[in-house]
Amino acid sequence: MLKSILSGEDCAACRFCCSFRRKSLWETPLFDKATKEILEKKYPQAKFKKAGKESFTVDLLHLYKSDDSEEEAACPFLSESGCVLSKDEKPFDCSIWPLRATKIEGKVKVMLENTCPAINRQPIENVENLVKSGLSKKIISYAEKNPDMLKDFQDGFVILG
Ligand code: SF4
Ligand code: SF4
């Protein structure tokens, strides 16, 4: 989450981005191999699977209890008090949500997804200013080194940088 423009209260009441319907499984967070190996030891209940060339993500398929396409499965690192991961363990994806990196005409771009209710209640200028203040460079640089995190652009998303 974008801590500088989101409040802990908003997120505590929501948690949308830490739970996933089947159609949102493309959104589960990515971990590098070293972090995955640490987390497997610390949290044996968490299952991982390969995602892209170098990355791993949480495998949630076994957590669904019905065929309901609206059923959500929570990330195994979500507790009653929020994410249990330390700053070093938390995926970059999670720290920048609802921003994402995409590739358009060969160039990495920063896009804003349209499903975070707390961001959607704010003027888009708040996110634009944050992105322009240096976050865009950080995301693009990270995505160029970690192309597994690139997501497809979709209708409703907004390119910001
Ligand atoms: S979707 Fe937005 S408001 Fe909800 S928990 Fe995630 S960052 Fe917070
Ligand atoms: S790793 Fe933490 S912040 Fe990311 S989806 Fe899981 S619980 Fe949420």
Image (cartoon, grey):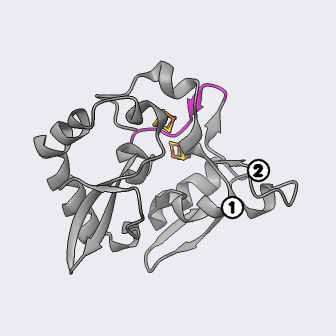
**Where residue 63 appears, x then y in whole percent?**
79, 55
The quadrant of the image that shows the C terminus is bottom left
Is the residue indicated by label 1 positioned so its CB lies within 8 Å of ligand 2? no
**Where residue 127 appears, x then y in whole percent?**
25, 38
**Where residue 81 appears, x then y in whole percent?**
60, 25
Residue type at tag 2: Glu
Looking at the image, which residue is at 42% across and 65% down?
A: 154
Q: Which residues are magenta?
A: 80-89
Residue type at tag 1: Arg
**Of marks 2 and 1, which one's residue comes earlier in the chain?**
1
Q: What is the quadrant of residue 100 in the picture?
A: bottom left
- What SS does tag 1 mark? helix
Of 99 and 149, the residue lying toward us: 99
In the rendered image, the residue lying farthest to the top is 9
For residue 22, the mark is 1
**Where residue 116 appears, x then y in whole percent?**
46, 40
Name the dominant secondary structure of the magenta segment: loop
Circles 2 and 1: CB atoms closer than 8 Å: yes
Looking at the image, which residue is at 55% across and 61% down?
A: 37
Camera sees residue 58? no
Looking at the image, which residue is at 50% across and 56% down?
A: 29
68 horizontally vs 149: left or right = right
Inter-mark Cα distance, 2 to 1? 8 Å
Categorize mark 2 by other alpha carbons within 10 Å: few (<14), some (14-19), many (20+).
some
Of 132 and 85, the residue lying toward us: 132
- Whether 24 is drawn above or below 134: the answer is below
- What SS does tag 2 mark? loop
- The residue beneath circle 2 is 71
- Whether 92 is drawn above or below 146: the answer is above
147 horizontally vs 70: left or right = left
Count of numbered labels shown in the rendering:
2
Categorize mark 1 by other alpha carbons within 10 Å: few (<14), some (14-19), many (20+).
some
